Image: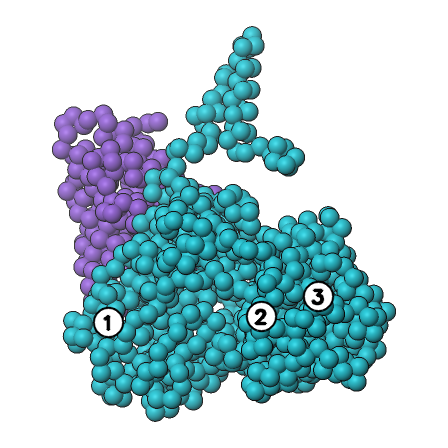
Chain colours: A cyan, B purple
Amino acid sequence: MSQKTRALSRRQFLKGISVAGAASLLPLKLLMPYSAEAATAFREQDFQIFRNACPRNCYDTCSIKTFVKDGVVKFIEGAQESTFTKGGLCVKGYAYPRRVYSPDRIKYPMVQDGRRSGNWRRVSWDEAMDRIAGKILEIKEKDGNLLGMGLTKYSGNFGITNCGVEGMMSSLGYTTRFVGTPCWPAGIDAQNYDLGDMWCNDPEDMVKSRYVIIWGANPAWCSVHSMKYVNEAKRRGAKVVVIDPIFTQTAAKGDVYWQPETSSDGALALGMARHILDQGLVDNDFVNTHAIGFAEFAAYLRENVTVEWASQVSGIPAVQIREVAEEFATADPATIWIGYGMQRHTNGGASVRAIDALVAMTGNVGKEGGGARYGHLRTWGFNYHALLQKQPEGSTGFIGATGPKGEFDFTKGEAASFTDRTVNINKTAQAILDAKDPALRMLWVSCKNPFAQDFDRPKLEKAFDTLEMVVSVEQFFTETVSNSDIVLPVTTLFEEWTVNASYWHYWVGINEQAIKPMYETKSNIEIAALLSKKMNQLSPGSCTFPQDIDTREWLEKEFNQGIYDYLGIKHWTDLKNGPVKARLASSASWSDMKFGTPSGKYEFQSELCQQNGHDALPRYKEGRKPYDEFRLLTPHTKFGLHSQFVNLDWMQEFNKEPFLYMHPDDAQEKKIADLDTVRVFNKVGELRIKVKLTSNVAKKSLVIYEAWFGAGNDFNVQNLVDDESSDMGAYKTGAPGVAIHGQFANVERV
Amino acid sequence: MNDACIASLEGLRDFFSACNAIELKDAAGRIGGSVDAAVLSATDWTAVEYEFNRLFVGPAAVPAPPYASAYCESDRVLMGKAALEARELYHQLGLAAPQEGVIPDDHLAYELEAMIVLKSALGADTPSVPDTVARHAWFVREHLARWLPRFILATRTHASQGGVIALATDALAAWFDNELNTIAASHPK
């Protein structure tokens, strides 16, 4: 409250200036009255204000207010209506107008005469569609089906209507889909085995926590809006423990920092669990009434786990493990934020299960301010109208599997005689090379930059070279575009209608079209409509996608009564007044203790997990064995969302070039000095990069932030990351995750 | 004299708004004719198109964006004040960029077309309407002069020497120098 009264709004501030005009009453001779009103005053009525929502793959899914004048986005700010966004955006978000108005934006449909040649020609949309539709019909003619056409799409634009990309593929026939997710699948499966769904507490209720462990997440960079809840919890007396192999900005703000051996998280959690068990700090009511399998879990702990063993595996002193375990078990409520980074390992799912167990045995599941927080999809109950398109009559496809899956696939598909062919998105290169009968001939890429995100880049380039046609739908010139034949320019968030939900908080926001689409850009669903028109011109009945669409109408088609009831609104247009938060019975997930597991209880011992090829209990699973001298970590950067934003001038002002970060002791041994250029290499490939020495990084590990691209630099961490699978993910997302942080490399000065 | 100047401006307008090799070839021929420079008959026009796109269009980051705002703002960003200034000028002339706001109003080709309108009006008016004279002088001195030299420099830095794009850029530079000098002589500030 006091903060509110202290903070002057922009308007109040300017009013203050004009009050200073009282100075004109003084007997002045030289200085002239200055009209702040005319020169600098901000008057809201001078602007058209639109509601937008950040569609990036980020915890925060910010609600945005966009100020437009003369048909130009002048600036944007975070919506005040959302207590989560609370009027502020991150550094990337504030740069959004730079995306729209960057001179480097992709403006027209273009074709490249020879991949990676840089020889591009403009074509009309009609000609682009003619080439694409011609190729699709040629594939159908040659193969008798359309399985030779593949789609790789992920999280580049989470606006719900962008599911029309998948819809477009279905409307053409049965195709090949890259399914799964590189992001969070092991943890999703783990939480499904333990709890019956991935469903986190409202992050805003972290303020109620008396003890917060942030385990393998760096919200100070990757969820800046969540930090205010962590900070407030701390201000109210909570202890904040940060566990991360890198001393992050989040770690710097914690009370306790642990830098464990990477991928030893399961051992650490189990060691804590053993100590809690020994100390009699288990919440007996929870484990006896609301859970099954605790006795078996306790027996496993007693027989196989000691604090000393956990200390030995993790490198964290036993005395500290005991101390934090006791504090965690006695604080009420206590919570653990399970980051996505810690499950990107060959033992990631098992580690998340161990942490879930730690939260559950202390009675912190189903409790406000408690919880094993990972993510949720409760606010995603849209109609998926854009997604659900029917195959043309007579289409044939793959016989066998049940069709594509994914964590965002909310369709309850009926059994069909044919389905799409699904391949693992985390093994894109290998899947392209391995696809047979028919081979993959054509790839459509949208909302994704495979050359920045997919693993084993040298192999990916080889794989792309086997494709007869690659079409990329993009806003900027990425390495994927360079490896494409055709690029189609796509709209930014300000140029289309859609709606966005979060996988972390519980706010839903509308995304209004604020300006005309610039140049010849089109939204994903408009592109689909255009392709449909061309397909039907060339071969009537060959595509079922509507040929004439309006993105506003298609947004409307996504809503249903369930969403309205959950959000407490009458109509989607209510969201024009600002974002709305779901009406939650409790800020805690599972507050009614009715779990989604087969038993309806929390399952320390999961038969389903066992049936799917894992241990029934959250036993310790060792991480990937090192295959090179150093561990290689390639986490998210501060100034980008994967490869998005990093090419913008505002970002490059602070992030001019990528660096390798390594420990000074290791550098000394390798005769490497600060800012030397080094070669980082392993079995996958190599890259050359400047080095910065810092003890924020553990010894024997190399850290390179994930993505950077710009003119005159061929930096790509995927030259060093292979496509080894993580243990879990296949159950709920259709393919196992990937051991992004289970990577190793060597380094030498050049 | 004025007709020749307008023909030259038309050639430049069509060159910098060309979408393909055929349009580039046609416009370059007219530019060459207007400045007495021969375009080589052996010119590979597809290669010119590639280079044109690499410099001005994309899809890769462009070293010489043909928009005033990219040079006039403190940051390299489009649809800034310069674009709205250009829009205002067109409005004063009773004109507007097609689907206003879709292509930035300060695209070089639009500005060259506005110049054609101004020059035509100046040529036809006897004596010239003061508004037209003032608008023309403002456009040259206060608008084009703020960005064209920098655009020309960026293009010369990145275009292949002796090529068609260098030729068109030289023609643009020569026209603009002449325009600036003429104004300075006839309408001192």
Q: What residue is rendered at 23% in x and 77% in y?
A: A392
Q: Which residue is mark 1?
A: A544
Residue A363's label in the rendered image is 3
State which quarter of the image contains the N terminus of chain B.
Answer: top left
Q: Is residue A486 visible?
A: no
Look at discs 1 and 2 and give the one toward the viewer: 2
In-image side of A3 versus B8 (left or right): right
Q: Which residue is mark 2?
A: A595
Residue type at the position of mark 3: Gly
Task: Say whether marks 3 and 1 touch (CB < 8 Å).
Answer: no
Q: How far across and how far down the image is residue B129, in percent?
A: 19, 26
Note whether A81 is above or below A109 in the view shown. above
Q: Secondary structure at mark 1?
A: loop
Q: What residue is rendered at 33% in x and 80% in y?
A: A175
- Callout 2: few (<14), some (14-19), or many (20+) C-alpha neighbours within 10 Å? many
Q: How far across and how far down the image is residue A716, in percent?
A: 53, 71
Q: What residue is rendered at 73% in x and 55% in y?
A: A210
Residue type at the position of mark 1: Thr
First in sequence: mark 1 vs mark 2: 1
Q: Mark 3 falls within which chain?
A: A
Rounded to the nearest angstrom, the CA distance separating label 2 from label 3 is: 14 Å
Residue type at the position of mark 2: Phe
Q: Mark 2 falls within which chain?
A: A
First in sequence: mark 3 vs mark 1: 3
